Amino acid sequence: MSPPVFLRTAGKADVAAVSRLLGETWHATYDSIYGEARVEEITRSWHAPKALEARLGRPNTEFVVADDGSRILGMAFAGAGGADGKMVSLHQLYVHPDAQGRGIGRDLLAEIEGCFPSATRMRLEVEEANYQAAAFYERHGFAKVGSTQGKDGDFGIPAAVYEKALV
């Protein structure tokens, strides 16, 4: 039986573990789509400890980890946007491949939704070829509302845009 998983706010001591989690998860998910070298380049940029540490304590954001007492199994990062804070952007939600299917992603998503009580909508982007993630979000009430073409700043990755009403 797996040890219990606790959700908590990420701290500076978690940054290296979250960086490793993201690297391993991205390689497992995207190597077959983009190739190992490109995924390594992206993770070195987006998931570097300094990039993650800069998110800690940002106003109007939540950075949550799923911890079983021996390692970080998942993470989520979101922020409220706009002048009224009614739209929440889920920037990241990842669960380590060997911990998927245990409800950790569901619990992280619910935690993030609860962190923004005045929000009325949540938006996220999913890589078009990441069918598993798209199916996860659809099962949790998100609907595709558009797509992006990908810009140089995001390594040209096209994404499906999903939204969900928060009530």
Image: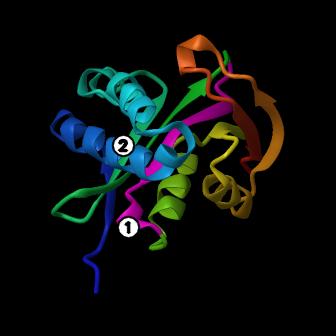
Position in image of residue 69 (x %, y %): 18, 64
Looking at the rendered structure, the kind of residue marked 1 is Ala
Position in image of residue 41 (x %, y %): 38, 26
Q: Which residue is mark 2?
A: 22
Tell me, for residue 65, which label it has, or none: none
Q: Residue furthest bottom?
A: 1
Q: Which residues are magenta?
A: 84-100
Q: Quadrant of the N terminus?
A: bottom left
Looking at the rendered structure, the kind of residue marked 2 is Leu
- Callouts 1 and 2 close, C-beta under 8 Å: no
Q: Is residue 119 visible?
A: no
- In the image, 108 versus 71, the foreground residue is 71
Q: Residue furthest top?
A: 152
- In the image, 104 versus 31, the foreground residue is 31
Q: Which residue is mark 1?
A: 99
- In the image, 83 versus 139, the foreground residue is 139
Position in image of residue 154 (x %, y %): 55, 20
Mark 2 residue element: helix
